[in-house]
Amino acid sequence: MKRKRNIVLFGLMTFCLLALSSVLLPPAASGQEKVIPEEIRQQVSQTDYNAVRIKKFPVAMQCWTYRGYTFLEALEKTRALGIDYVQAFPGQRLSRELPPSVMFHHQMAEEHLKLVREKLSALKMGLVAYGVVDTGRTEEEMRRVFDFARKLGIRVIVTEPRDEDYPILDRLVKEYNVRIAVHNHPEPSKYAHPAMALKYLQGLDERIGVCADTGHWMRGNLKPVECLRLLQGRVIDVHLKDRSDFGTRNAEDVAFGSGKADLKSVLAELTLQDYDGFLTVEYENEKEVMTPEPAIQKGLEFIRKITYYEGFEQLLSRRNGYYEKHGWNHYGPGHFELDRRTGILKSQGGMGLLWYSRKKYKDFILDLEFKCSQKNTNSGIFLRIPEVPTSDDYIYHSFEIQIYDAGEGIHRTGAVYDAQAPNREASRPTGEWNHFRIAFIGDRLTVELNGQMVVDWKAEPRGKVRDFAREGYIGLQNHDSLSPVYFRNIYIKEISN
């Protein structure tokens, strides 16, 4: 146990030094920078977080959770929990097979880097972030950290910069395309309050943002969801924690969903911000430093239960914060424009089809949002297109879920076009986003529009459809050039029998 205590002590000293270094040259701070603006508080209070369809976020383990173990042991324990990614911190003993002085650090010898790579590869794991780390005092020292990140494929460096570090970091993130996440240790760290971090970030490259530690905000009596709303657009990493209470006296880390962080609202806020980083698990309950697994498993199950898109695949891929149409092809006239920032597709011209070509789907649930620019906007969603579209013949062999508020019966929004009418009108006013949840399992086709079941039908050839396939492609129709339709948040979940 003595060796384990030494490891923990070293790590604690590292974290404390980082926190203290961040206050050596604080800017002139006003009381305004230690409160959440009333405007933000009102925005949060007026947001119906229960109505948010929480997206599925990738999960990583901050190795500080396993500070009582070596780095290689932390990898094995993380893998046993079913987590594929880790965030390392400097100062953790590397392996029990090596002297205690050999620690995970950005100045590791090449032979130890090789050991790390081999272990990650053997476990099929990714090292996605590194910190909290002191990046040094000179550009040369900072480059060592960035070079280390490049060698191991690390995407995010978590740190607490000094004032004079920012111009150098701003250049380096552009050169290396590695993100910097400013961490919020509690006071006396100058980044304890999100408004102060936001002040430093003004005018800097978008790859410099914050590592939002929900537990440290709670230690400072700050509500995590309000802090996140204030930092909207600048959240790069999240150290996810729940605590039994606010402040520090008698408060401790607990399993996600068991404390007072209101993590359901936190994940809903991250969903609204379209956060594209990791939920990094960091469990700091000192009573359970050697056995954190029960609390972590309970917390991960809580996240799964509140995640609307659990088990779904997002059909618009995303990389480094930008959406892409990889895997999508277009047949016929017109096209769809993609806003790479927001992931919103906008139809242009027509009549054509944007179809997802990577695979055919058999039984599935398709979940997406759409918006009409005019009442007579006309579009549709094609299901189980049997073959690669080379002519308009696909319309006779696949069902279309209609989008057309000006239509009636079998031609109105929610209908199975030309075959089965919706049992009610459930569209929202023109210009507002609508939500479709479409299930096609065997020959049963159901359509929910804005939470209301509008079609529950045993599919059969009818109207224009002569026959339908057991499996096929998904397609989005662009109908004409006068009334565009918009799509976003396109997810699919395969159902296996």
Image (cartoon, helix red, strand yellow):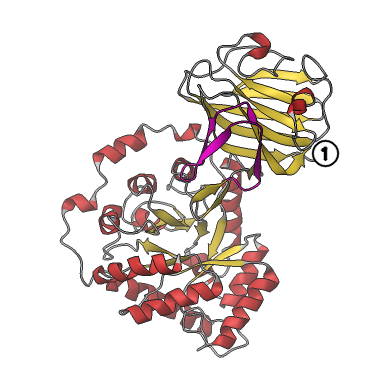
- What type is the residue that disc 1 sits on? Asn
Q: Residues within 10 Å of mark 1 (few under 14, many from 20)?
A: few
Quadrant of the rendered structure where residue 188 is? bottom left
Quarter of the image for residue 41 reads: top left
Q: Nearer the viewer, residue 121 or 279?
A: 121
Q: Answer yes or no: is residue 425 visible.
A: yes
In magenta segment, residue 486:
no
- Residue appearing at x 32%, y 46% in the figure: 230
Q: Position of residue 392 (x, y in %)?
A: 73, 27
Residue 159 quadrant: bottom left
Residue at 48% over, 23% down: 373
Residue 358 at x, y percent in the picture = 71, 46
For the record, the magenta segment spans 325-352
> Which residue is label 1 attached to?
497
> Against 281, is 274 above or below?
above
Where's residue 272, x and y in %?
Answer: 45, 40
Image quadrant in which the C terminus is located? top right
